[in-house]
Image (cartoon, helix red, strand yellow):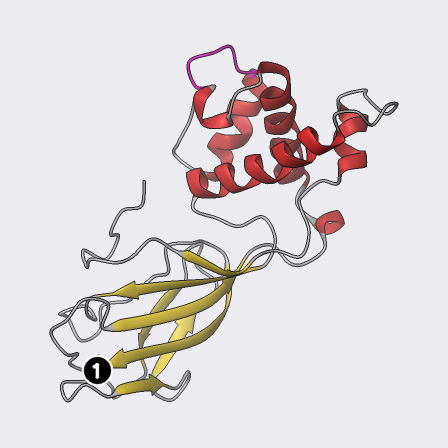
Amino acid sequence: MFSDPDHIHRTPPKVITPPAAEPNSLAEVKAHMRRSSGTSEDDLITMYIKSCRKTLERMLGMAFLNTVFEERLDAFPCSSDEPVSPYISDVSAIGFLKYIDTTGILTTLVENTDFVVDYSSKRARIVPAYGHIWPVTRLQPNAVQMQYTAGHGTDPNALDEDLKTMHLLAVTMAYTERLPISALAGNDVPAGFGQIVSNFTNWSF
C-alpha cells in the first residue's frame, strides 16, 4: 500500500528504468538452497528471484539496486517551505522536478537554483532554495512530475549483507512453500528473516 506522506495525492512510484541486476544471482540462490546441481527449475527460481525482490521493495518502500522511478503529485505543499519527499528511500539523484503552471505550461525547476535536496535523510527532502517558494500549480491531477534514482548502488556484490540475506531467505521461502512472499505472513517465518525486515522498516511478520 502506498500512502501520501506529504498529505498530497500522489501516484504510486512507477519504475522507469529497472535495476540492471538482481540482489542475488541464480547461482547464489541455488547455492543457498543447496540445489547447485540440476537446471530443471532454474526458470522457476529465476522468477522467484525477481518477484521476491519486487515484493520486498514494495513492502519496504525501497530499491535494492539503483532504479529510476517517477511519481506525480496534484500540487506542491501549501506551506512554502514544506519539503516534498519521494516515496522510495535512499534517493541518490533527482532526474527532474516539473510542474504545470497556472497557464498550462509544463515548467522544469532547476536543482540548487529553484530547489535543494537533502540526500542524507533516509527519505530525501526536497525544499525550495533559499529565497524561493513552491510555485502555484494548475488545479488539475498530477500537476507535479518528479523523477529520481533510488537504491543502494549498481553492484549487487557491494550490497549490505542484510539486504542480500533478506532476499535470499525470501526467495527460499517462496520456492519452498510455492507461495508469494506477501502470502507467507501467517505461516512459520524464520525469526531471522523477520528481524532483518524490521531493521529496514516498521513492517513485520
> Which residue appears farthest toward the right when viewing the image?
37
Is 57 on the left-hand or right-hand side of 202? Answer: right
Quadrant in the picture for residue 13: bottom left
> Which residue appears farthest toward the top when viewing the image?
188
Q: Which residue shows up at 81% across the image and 20% down it?
A: 34
| Residue 188 magenta | yes
Q: Which residue shows up at 50% across the image and 37% down it?
A: 56
Residue 109 horizontal/vertical position (percent): 34, 84
Quadrant in the picture for residue 31: top right
78 or 32, nearer to the observer: 32
User: Disc count in the image?
Assistant: 1
Residue 64 horizontal/vertical position (percent): 58, 48
Residue 183 horizontal/vertical position (percent): 44, 21
Q: Quadrant of the N terminus?
A: top left
Q: Which residue shows up at 43% across the image and 46% down it?
A: 61
Residue 98 horizontal/vertical position (percent): 33, 79
In the figure, 86 relative to 131: above or below? above
44 or 60, nearer to the observer: 44
- Residue on which disc 1 sits: 133
Dominant secondary structure of the residues highlighted in magenta in the image: loop
Region in magenta: 185-190
Residue type at mark 1: give it.
Ile
Which type of secondary structure does the marked residue at label 1 adopt? loop
Is 162 on the left-hand or right-hand side of 37? Answer: left
Crowdedness of circle 1 by 10 Å Cα count: few (<14), some, many (20+)? some
